[in-house]
Every structure is written in structure tokens, then in C-alpha cells.
Image (tube, grey):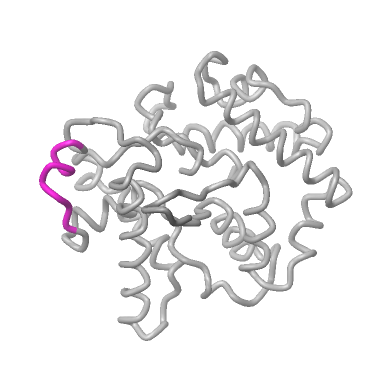
Amino acid sequence: MNAINFGSGWWPTIRKRPGQSGYGTIAAGLGDRFDAAGPWSAAALEAIGAGEIAAVVDQDPAHPLMAEFAAALRDVGAHLRADHDGSYLAVAQEAETVPALAAIFAGWDAFADVSGYDGRAVPFYKRAQLAAADLHRAGVARLPGVERLTAFADNLVPHVLRVDGVLRLDPELTAQIEAGELLPHGAPQEVELRAGAVHAVELLTGAVGGALTAAGIDSALWNRGRGHRYKSIPRHRSRNTAY
């Protein structure tokens, strides 16, 4: 799921399950498939196409996200086969820390997430870090270092921080977001929104003396964003494979 946990810029265009968000719809479809048939083998992932994943998540195979999902899953399959003898578990067993596990994922195209800003590379690696954190939370990767992860920069955490007054945006950018205009991925404003959220969460972590990790605060903010107050106000949308 972490390999295809992107597409929020397309959520208004997909077919959603009753009462489910875009993410919830995709996750539920994938969960149903695993419950019914178990995980794909590495070889099966390497061969997956847009039509197969579209059937799993009940979407039009011609929707642009389906080709992107299939490409990400094929990349996961290729790395599992070539680097880890086809074993999902072997990935977690290779790393000595949670950040090291995130770094493994960050080297895969499926988890690519580096933006440019004023001539500098800005490595967010939202999903690579989230995958490592999820494996840690599930007890699969009982590794040290989770406190060294940053917030998982997407479009919901910046939105919650904006609505709660932590992030203050230029009025023109606020108007653009609330009008539903897409922000180009990698545009300065889009990079600043994500980076501002990461920085704000680091400040919050410091404010509580490290009693909460950035990953823990991120999770609290993400769940907070599921509330009506936050859903009633448009968040920024950008069509990309980072989030």
C-alpha cells in the first residue's frame, strides 16, 4: 500500500466507496485482495498491468493513476526479486535502523520523492519513511531510530497546520488552493508547503521535549485532518507520485 500511497491530486476524479476517502477506497480494495488471495509474488508484481490493479481497486483502467500504480508495483517486484530473493520480509531484515530501512525504499523508483528548490535538492521521501514507520509500528521491523524520521510531507498535514493557524500562507496562494486550482509538483509554493509542514512538526517535537516523535505527531495531525472542520475547507492539490 505504501508503494501506491499517492494520487491525492486525483482523488476528486476517482470512484470512491460509500463513506470512504480516496485513500480509504484504494486501501480497502487492496486489503480485500490480500484477504481473498494473499500477497502477490515478486514475479507477479513485476508483470502487473494497469488493468489488474484497476480491477483490484475498482477503477477505470484508463485512469492515469492506474498506470502509475502498476509502474510502482512493478518496481517493487523487481527490487524484491533482484535484491531480496523475492522476499518482502528480507527487506526489513537487511536494515539495522528505521532510517536505514527508509533509505532502502528511497532508492527505489516506486518511492522516489525529491523536489528541486532554488537550485537545491529537497529529499522529502514521504512514502519511503512512512513504509519504514509502518513496518516498525507493526512489529515487523523492530529497529531503533524511529525518532529520526521526519514528518511525512503530503497535502493533508500542511492543510491541518494551516487551518489551525500554525502555517500562514500568502493570501494569493490561499485563494488559489480554495479555488481548487492544482499546484504544479515542484513549484516553489508546493515545495514550501511540504517543507513548512516538516519544519513545523520538528518545532512541535522540540516543544514537547521529544516526548513525541515527528512520526507520532504526523499521525495525530493526519487523523485530525479526517474531521469535518478540515474536510470542509479545500486543501492543496498536486498531481504527482510523491503523495
Residue 94 sits above or below residue 88 on the image = below
Does residue 178 appear left or right of residue 194 in this picture? left
The residue sitting at 19% across, 41% down in the picture is 233
**Is 123 situated left or right of 189 in this image?**
right
Q: Image quadrant for the N terminus? A: top right
- Quarter of the image where one finds residue 210: bottom left
Q: How many marks?
A: 0
In the image: residue 46, left or right of residue 108 = right
Q: Residue at x 54, y 56 (%)?
A: 130
Instruction: Give above or below for 135 relative to 204.
Output: above
The percent coordinates of residue 29 (x first, y second) are 57, 31
The one of 22 and 203 positioned closer to us in this rendering = 203
Q: Residue at x 74, y 61 (%)?
A: 92
**Residue 87 sits inside the magenta stretch:** no
Q: Which residues are magenta?
A: 168-176
Residue 28: name its quadrant.
Answer: top right
* Residue 237 rendering spot, x and y as whole percentages: 32, 36
Mainly helix, strand or loop, the magenta region? Answer: helix
Q: Is residue 160 left or right of residue 15?
A: left
The image shows residue 115 at horizontal and vertical percentages of 45, 49
Residue at the bottom extreme of this rendering:
209
